[in-house]
Image (tube, helix red, strand yellow):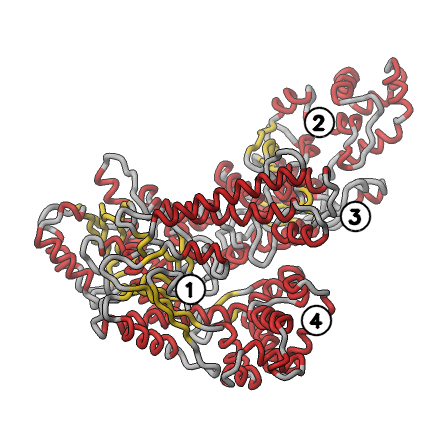
């Protein structure tokens, strides 16, 4: 494979905004190339394989012709950084890669192809460079991408003849006459591909044409004679070198099994979001193929489809020993779920499948007793979903030893997919049966019940084996206690919160939706009026044409699709000009987003009149919870519109009020604790306003003389440091010059040196160990801390500053939730927890329990952990979420 040409093609074929890591590293070239690589290995099944790269533009061709490729623009930095990472990926795959000083990748390919064909190999070349067509023979085929990076055209001698009317050996003659603008090789004026091909066919070869150039008639003939020297140079340069000295020949390029652990590290660092990517790549691992031929011992499933009255006996025989793996198929509708299939598997081989709807009374009682028994160990994938849907059947799941999704998250929190099929391939070298691989929803297995049951039992066994493998990894990275004491109990609590939901006033939300829709229409009309005609406000292209072409407003940051029109750019334009359009565009987007948020809320109101969000424990690498369907974190906290939306969340029937409890400045308290800065700790314990106290220190004025602007700057500074904000970022946030922002940071650190020392120490320690850690042992791996790429390294440094602070805050919130829930149940209260959003929890309070709930919540939340800057909690109550604010 021609690494450079294919990766470069992928770089421009795939949108960068869809392929980049959280550190800002673009990965579109790597993803596109590796996708093509996986497809090629799958479709061609080569026994020997290698990838060739260019070293630089300085080659024997540029020495002979200084203008060779001189017309090409500088290789984008975003591409160069990816080539290095691509090399790491290929090394982890144990793929031989060649890059020879003074030669192009084409020359290396030509040398290997020629030698391999002579040795009796059948050769395939995957390249985006047509010069390789000269290598095509009956034994050598060129696979040329003709549509992005997804479709390849197979060039055989017959295909080359069909396409160009020439034999492969005549192709360099043709290319010399035609010229190549991309290589800066001049053609002959007035001579295109048809004429060049006609001449080669007429005279038989380039050499014969040159010898008989006087015979070519007309203006084209004269142009040929006038440019003979340049086309002769072209001919020398288009001929590929077939005798490059290489450190390995074709026989030494046998495909090797992957270094699976190293490849996982590289893939985690790349943060590919596409769930099937790893599966495709690992599916063509020679080591995995070998395993398929000779399966490892102990993975055979001795499955039984249980009939009426057989589950109790099976559980009595197999459910009292080691842990059982469990796989569940459920159907969800309007916030409730029903279990349609369950499979259980033992480590020894016996497994069982049953339909819960067919259980008799004795079997159902036995199953309910087994699931609720904490002494009967179980392993599940995404235990929270199983807990929630089981609760709709009146069953409780206790005794979960490992949740394989949570375990993989704690081991590698930066990855994007925790799908069971991908984890199985990575950790077990085993692919799930197709039906089982679909998991997590209602499966369409067809009519073959036995195949359906076998697939689910295989999945249950995979969950069990994966639990063992990941359990060992949890011990290795020191996360076993975090799983047992924090994440699994949080899963159980979240399942109950999801099932409870929160009462929603559909009429109020519909009224809000109409209000935002009207505001959107008004913003559209105002935008059209400001320019004197209609245009599509949702079209970036049309907006660019109006702003920068028609109105001639100052140019913003240049992107591949034109001048950016994001929110920051529009805000900048609004400040730089007096034109109304940027202001109306910001208004339009704000109201459109609010309308979309409310529409999403209305759609998710279930038949019981409540919204049942789904909480995610494995999305944020810092450990924070997020929510989907709907995303409650999308509701603005500090705006009038956000507060109005929150009025649509009401106390439900049978309850008296909602109670909200929110940690006050938790990230800053964590930063004070971790830095041990005496001045910052004193600011928290002195009883005065934190930001006023800090501002008085930084600006050297009495607390009473701190003005609102000083306070605003210090507040942005304090929170910015907790999130790894740079001086430039602070200047952008405050609208001040970078030099002023730097002075502000210097003044801050002069007063609070402990914070400065902590931040430096955190990055240095993370660079040495490869990870940061919260006070509870949650790790965040940051391999880019040692990257040669400055942008990636600086992004990783900011993440290293943020992860211990935000991660510790996230852990504290989870501990607080568990303490509050445990206390509610210990005191046998009917009040219950409904929501967790940002640093806030929301409870639904039963009649007569408000005072005891408020006291309980304050006690348990402030006592969640002991910090040098003590935790503080604000509590409020009311009939709706907004009126319960504090």
Rounded to the nearest angstrom, the CA distance separating label 1 from label 4 is 36 Å
Residue nearer the viewer, 616 or 708: 708
Marks 3 and 4, the one that precedes in the sequence: 3
The quadrant of the rendering that contains the C terminus is bottom left
Element under disc 4: helix
> In the rendering, at what x and y percent does residue 602 appear?
37, 46
> Which disc, if any, is residue 58?
3
Q: Which residue is mark 1?
A: 410
Res 110 seen here: no
Give the residue displayed 73% in from the left and 47% down from the top.
555
**Residue 206 versus residue 876 in the image, above or below:** above
User: Mark 1, residues whose alpha carbon is within 10 Å: few (<14), some, or many (≥20)?
Assistant: many
Rounded to the nearest angstrom, the CA distance separating label 1 from label 3 is 47 Å
- Camera-near label (1 vs 2) is 1
User: Mark 2, residues whose alpha carbon is within 10 Å: few (<14), some, or many (≥20)?
Assistant: some
> In the rendering, at what x and y percent does residue 302 appear?
21, 50
- Camera-near label (1 vs 3) is 1
> In the rendering, at what x and y percent does residue 740 appear?
72, 70
> Which disc, if any, is residue 324?
none
Element under disc 2: helix
């Amino acid at each position: 494979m021609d690494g450079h040409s294919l990766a470069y093609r992928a770089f421009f074929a795939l949108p960068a905004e869809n392929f980049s890591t959280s550190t800002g590293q673009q990965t579109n070239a790597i993803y596109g190339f590796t996708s093509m690589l996986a497809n090629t290995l799958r479709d061609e099944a080569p026994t020997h394989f290698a990838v060739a790269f260019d070293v630089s533009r300085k080659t024997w061709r540029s020495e002979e012709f200084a203008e060779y490729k001189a017309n090409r623009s500088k290789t984008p930095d975003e591409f160069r950084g990816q080539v290095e990472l691509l090399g790491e990926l290929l090394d982890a795959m144990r793929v031989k890669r060649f890059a020879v000083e003074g030669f192009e990748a084409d020359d290396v390919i030509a040398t290997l192809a020629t030698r391999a064909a002579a040795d009796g190999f059948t050769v395939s070349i995957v390249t985006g460079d047509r010069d390789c067509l000269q290598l095509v023979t009956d034994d050598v085929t060129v696979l040329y991408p003709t549509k992005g990076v997804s479709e390849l055209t197979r060039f055989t001698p017959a295909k080359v003849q069909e396409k160009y009317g020439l034999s492969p050996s005549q192709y360099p003659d043709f290319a010399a006459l035609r010229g190549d603008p991309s290589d800066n090789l001049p053609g002959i004026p007035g001579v295109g591909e048809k004429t060049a091909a006609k001449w080669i066919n007429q005279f038989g070869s380039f050499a014969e044409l040159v010898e008989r150039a006087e015979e070519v008639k007309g203006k084209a003939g004269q142009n040929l004679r006038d440019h003979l020297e340049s086309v002769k140079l072209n001919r020398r340069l288009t001929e590929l070198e077939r005798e490059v000295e290489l450190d390995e020949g074709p026989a030494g390029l046998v495909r090797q099994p992957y270094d699976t652990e190293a490849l996982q590290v590289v893939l985690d660092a790349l943060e590919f979001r596409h769930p099937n990517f790893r599966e495709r790549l690992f599916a063509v691992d020679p080591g995995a193929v070998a395993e398929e031929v000779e399966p490892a011992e102990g993975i055979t499933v001795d499955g039984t489809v249980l009939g009426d009255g057989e589950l109790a006996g099976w559980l009595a025989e197999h459910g009292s020993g080691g842990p059982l793996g469990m796989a569940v198929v459920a159907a969800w509708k309007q916030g409730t779920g029903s279990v349609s299939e369950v499979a259980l598997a033992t480590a020894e081989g016996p497994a069982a499948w049953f339909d819960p709807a067919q259980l008799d009374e004795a079997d159902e009682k036995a199953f309910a007793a087994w699931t609720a028994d904490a002494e009967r160990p179980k392993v599940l994938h995404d235990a929270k979903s199983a807990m929630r849907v089981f609760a709709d059947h009146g069953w409780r799941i206790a005794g979960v030893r490992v949740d394989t999704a949570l375990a993989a998250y704690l081991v590698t929190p930066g990855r994007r997919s925790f799908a069971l099929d991908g984890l199985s391939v990575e950790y077990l070298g085993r692919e799930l049966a197709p039906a089982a691989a679909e998991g997590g929803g209602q499966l369409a297995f067809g009519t073959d019940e036995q195949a359906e049951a076998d697939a689910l039992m295989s999945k249950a066994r995979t969950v069990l084996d994966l639990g063992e493998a990941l359990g060992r990894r949890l011990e290795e990275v020191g996360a076993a206690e975090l799983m047992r004491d924090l994440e699994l109990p949080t899963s159980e609590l979240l399942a109950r919160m999801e099932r409870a939901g929160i009462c929603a006033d559909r009429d109020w939300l519909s009224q809000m939706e109409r209000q935002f829709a009207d505001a959107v229409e008004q913003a559209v009309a105002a935008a059209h009026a400001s320019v004197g005609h209609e245009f599509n406000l949702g079209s970036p292209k049309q907006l660019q044409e109006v702003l920068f072409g028609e109105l001639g407003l100052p140019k913003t940051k240049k992107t591949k699709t034109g001048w950016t029109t994001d929110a920051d750019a529009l805000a900048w334009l609004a400040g730089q000009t007096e034109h109304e359009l940027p202001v109306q565009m910001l208004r339009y987007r704000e109201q459109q987003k609010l309308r979309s948020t409310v529409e999403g809320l209305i759609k998710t109101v279930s038949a019981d009149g409540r919204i049942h969000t789904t909480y995610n424990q494995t999305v944020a690498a810092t450990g924070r919870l997020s929510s989907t369907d709907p995303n409650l974190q999308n509701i603005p906290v500090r705006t009038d519109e956000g507060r109005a939306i929150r009025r649509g969340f009401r106390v439900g029937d049978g309850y008296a009020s909602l109670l909200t409890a929110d940690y006050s400045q938790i990230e800053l308290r964590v930063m004070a604790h971790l830095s041990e800065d005496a001045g910052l700790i004193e600011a928290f314990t002195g009883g005065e306003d934190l930001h006023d106290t800090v501002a008085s220190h930084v600006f050297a004025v009495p607390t009473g003389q701190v003005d609102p602007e000083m306070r605003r700057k210090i507040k942005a500074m304090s929170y910015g440091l907790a999130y790894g904000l740079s001086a430039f970022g602070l200047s952008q946030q405050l609208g001040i010059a970078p030099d002023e922002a730097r002075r502000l940071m210097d003044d801050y650190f002069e007063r609070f040196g402990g914070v400065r020392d902590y931040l430096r120490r955190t990055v240095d320690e993370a660079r040495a160990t490869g990870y940061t850690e919260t006070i509870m042992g949650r790790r965040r791996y940051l391999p880019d801390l040692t990257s040669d790429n400055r942008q990636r390294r600086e992004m990783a440094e900011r993440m290293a500053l943020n992860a211990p602070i935000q991660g510790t805050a996230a852990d504290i919130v989870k501990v607080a939730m568990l303490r509050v829930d445990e206390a509610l149940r210990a005191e046998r209260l009917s009040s219950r927890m409904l929501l967790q959003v940002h640093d806030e929890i929301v409870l639904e309070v039963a009649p007569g329990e408000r005072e005891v709930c408020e006291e309980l919540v304050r006690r348990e939340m402030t006592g969640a952990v002991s910090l040098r800057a003590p935790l503080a909690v604000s509590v409020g109550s009311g009939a709706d979420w907004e009126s319960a604010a504090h």
